[in-house]
């Protein structure tokens, strides 16, 4: 009886676990990893996919963005990759170098739903390595200017500035208007996106000699870093952190903010109702007028270890259809990579989305090297040092080039070895 009392609860527990395990119903199981909010929302799109693809069952796993990169690398090393996964488009070169993702050109050629010409060129290009496609854009991200249009109008600006010189004059005018305790521009100096955005607006590349060396001593990057530093030097941007951007914007503590599409929803929700008519979006001013911008966003990739690449592609293709992308945009607020989706009334009639739509035609990818995450981290640190005036621009570009050359040392060795073979 004592043994029976011990065994019966174990049997009950085993029965409970068995009841929670999905039975093998004969369908192909496609494992899909997605990050953050997208990982939550995409599950709502799976019932329709499974209904229209009755031979496939999708298992979605959500990853936090903060751990996603390391989780994917760990899964690759442990031979435990999912079939399909969301991939930040700056990560594509790294996972291509690891041979962790498959080429998609053959699938694309047979697709009735995916038209290359419908995608923004710069976004598509982030997924192309050596002329071959390794990911399909899922949603896009670029950075534009959120600005106080009411304050600018009071200062005589009917339109937002389009050049760097106009922008600086406008910010200086704002600073005079709001006083010494307030500022013109929010530039969180622990972030790199603003400096990167300024650098990408110019013709000279950030890396040279086929991505073997840094090119941060170029006149182009020097100008970008100089402008960035001047915003702090002239006290146009605060050094301290801002805990509530939306409150500070409504109080005229800041009047310009460089940010992405998710902030449209945040500004609508969190800027007080009395100040809702004060904000608008505009393309980022360029050296001599509007120019290039960051081609950000996420892509869908198929693991090279997948045992079901055909079914995995069917999921990628489904999520890339315009009707599904429209639903995804409605659920998440993420911006679609296909021009045809921007014709939907929700986006076409949204005045705050217009600047993003215009800028997406001119975005370009960052250098396609696996080491890019380390390079941009070094660039962020150098930008922060310039902002704090602990290093001059001239010294910063030399030191940054040296650090990037060190980061790329293994890349140079591998490329030289390939040439010798």
Image (cartoon, helix red, strand yellow):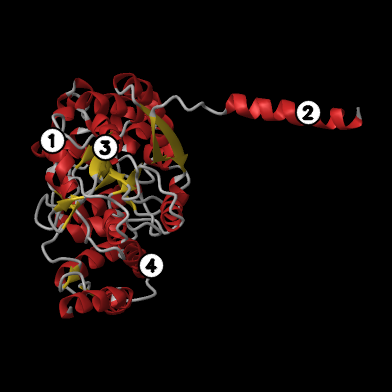
Q: Earlier in the sequence, mark 3 or mark 4?
A: 3
In the figure, is residue 363 to the left or right of 387? left
Farthest residue to the right: give it: 1
Q: Disc 3 to disc 4, how far (Cα)?
A: 43 Å
Q: Is residue 359 something that shows in the picture? A: no
- Marking on residue 110: 1
Residue at the (17%, 34%) spot, across then down: 338
Residue position for label 2:
9
- Marking on residue 381: 4
Q: Mark 2 and 1 residues: CB-CB less than 8 Å, in contact?
A: no
* Image x and y of residue 72, in percent: 41, 52
Q: Earlier in the sequence, mark 3 or mark 1?
A: 1
Residue at the (38%, 34%) spot, across then down: 266
Specify the quadrant of the image occupied by residue 335. top left
**Looking at the image, is 366 positioned above or below residue 347?**
below
Secondary structure, mark 1, is: loop
Give the position of the C terminus as an image quadrant: bottom left
In the figure, is residue 230 to the left or right of 117? right
Residue density around tag 4, few if under 14, some if 14–19, many if 20 or more, within 10 Å: some
Q: Earlier in the sequence, mark 4 or mark 2?
A: 2
Residue position for label 3:
310
């Amino acid at each position: 009886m004592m043994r029976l009392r011990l065994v019966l609860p174990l049997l009950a527990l085993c029965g409970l676990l068995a009841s929670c395990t999905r039975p093998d119903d004969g369908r192909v199981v496609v494992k899909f990893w997605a990050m953050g909010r997208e990982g939550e929302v995409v599950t709502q799109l799976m019932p329709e996919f499974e209904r229209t693809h009755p031979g496939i069952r999708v298992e979605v796993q959500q990853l936090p963005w903060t751990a996603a990169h390391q989780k994917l690398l760990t899964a690759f090393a442990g031979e435990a990759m999912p079939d399909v996964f969301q991939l930040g488009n700056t990560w594509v070169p790294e996972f291509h170098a690891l041979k962790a993702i498959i080429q998609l050109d053959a699938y694309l050629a047979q697709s009735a739903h995916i038209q290359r010409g419908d995608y923004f060129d710069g976004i598509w290009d982030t997924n192309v390595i050596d002329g071959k496609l390794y990911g399909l854009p899922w949603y896009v991200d670029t950075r534009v200017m959120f600005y106080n249009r009411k304050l600018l109008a009071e200062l005589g600006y009917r339109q937002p500035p389009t050049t760097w010189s106009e922008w600086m004059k406008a910010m200086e005018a704002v600073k005079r208007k709001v006083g010494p305790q307030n500022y013109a521009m929010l530039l969180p100096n622990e972030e790199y996106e603003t400096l990167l955005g300024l650098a990408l607006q110019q013709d000279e590349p950030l890396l040279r000699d086929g991505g073997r060396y840094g090119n941060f001593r170029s006149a182009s990057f020097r100008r970008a870093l100089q402008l960035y530093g001047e915003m702090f030097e002239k006290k146009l941007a605060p050094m301290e952190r801002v805990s509530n951007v939306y409150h500070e914007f409504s109080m005229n503590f800041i009047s310009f903010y460089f940010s992405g599409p998710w902030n449209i929803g945040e500004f609508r929700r969190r800027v007080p109702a009395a100040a809702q008519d004060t904000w608008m979006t505009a393309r980022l001013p360029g050296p001599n007028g509007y120019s290039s911008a960051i081609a950000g966003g996420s892509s869908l990739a198929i693991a090279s270890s997948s045992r079901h690449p055909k079914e995995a592609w069917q999921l990628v293709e489904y999520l890339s259809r315009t009707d599904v992308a429209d639903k995804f945009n409605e659920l998440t607020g993420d911006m679609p990579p296909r021009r045809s989706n921007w014709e939907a009334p929700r986006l076409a009639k949204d005045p705050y989305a217009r600047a993003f739509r215009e800028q997406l035609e001119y975005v370009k990818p960052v250098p396609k090297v696996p080491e890019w995450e380390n390079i941009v981290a070094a660039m962020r640190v150098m930008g922060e040092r310039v902002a704090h005036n602990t290093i001059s621009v001239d010294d910063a570009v030399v030191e940054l080039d040296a650090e990037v050359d060190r980061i790329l040392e293994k890349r140079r060795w591998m490329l030289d070895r390939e040439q010798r073979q």
